[in-house]
Image (spheres, grey):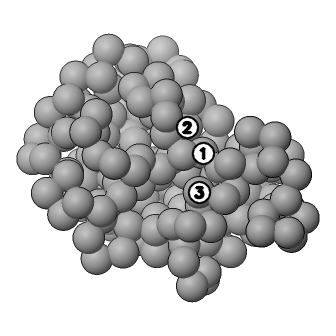
Amino acid sequence: MNTSSTSAGGGPVVVVPCSAAKLATTIPAPVADLYVGPFHRLCRQAAHAIAGSAGTVLVLSAAHGFVTLDEPLAPYELRMGEPGSVRPEQLRDQAGRLGLHHVAELVALGGRAYVDAVAAVRPDVLRPLDGCRAIGQQRARLSRIATADQPLLLAQELAASRAGSPALNGRPVSC
């Protein structure tokens, strides 16, 4: 794992899940190329929109924990929560080395197991996909974030809506 600090740019740090679908290779490939699943790619599009030029996008690998997009990894088969997946104490150690405890805005995109793993490290993490009942709703929110004029603001509003706020700036909350 690359342990350089992620807070150097001062922008938000966005964590996305790994993907079961991987590049057809037996040798290590950069994380940005390794994960090829459509949900992962949609999460990355939204993450890059939120992070902008000052932020950072990380992947939460079930096998390796927090990894940077340029880090080379060999393909593996493991999902978060399965035996052998990264443990919360490992994630806390990695988060400390990466400076995740000190970033002003940490956003987690993905399914519950992955977002919960990030929340175990930083309970104040923004969770803009919470409240969606199905993957189609998650995809719709990710698409909205990826194309928004102010993606971070939209992610903040969506995360706040799960806390009981019935509307976003007068608009009904929907996925």
Tell me the tag on residue 156.
Answer: 3
Horizontal relation, residue 117 to residue 56: left or right? right
- Amino acid type, label 2: Val
* Nearer-the-camera pick, 21 or 47: 47
- Amino acid type, label 3: Gln
Residue under circle 1? 127
**Which image quarter holds the C terminus?**
bottom right
**Residue drawn at 64 percent across, 35 percent down:** 112
Residue under circle 2? 115
Q: Position of residue 118 (x, y in %)?
A: 45, 33
Residue 90 falls in image quadrant: top left
**Which image quarter holds the N terminus?**
top left
The earlier-in-sequence mark between 1 and 3 is: 1
**Residue drawn at 85 percent across, 69 percent down:** 170
Residue 123, placed above or below residue 1: above
Residue 91, placed above or below residue 130: above
Q: Is residue 68 visible?
A: yes
* Nearer-the-camera pick, 16 or 161: 161
Q: Is residue 78 visible?
A: no
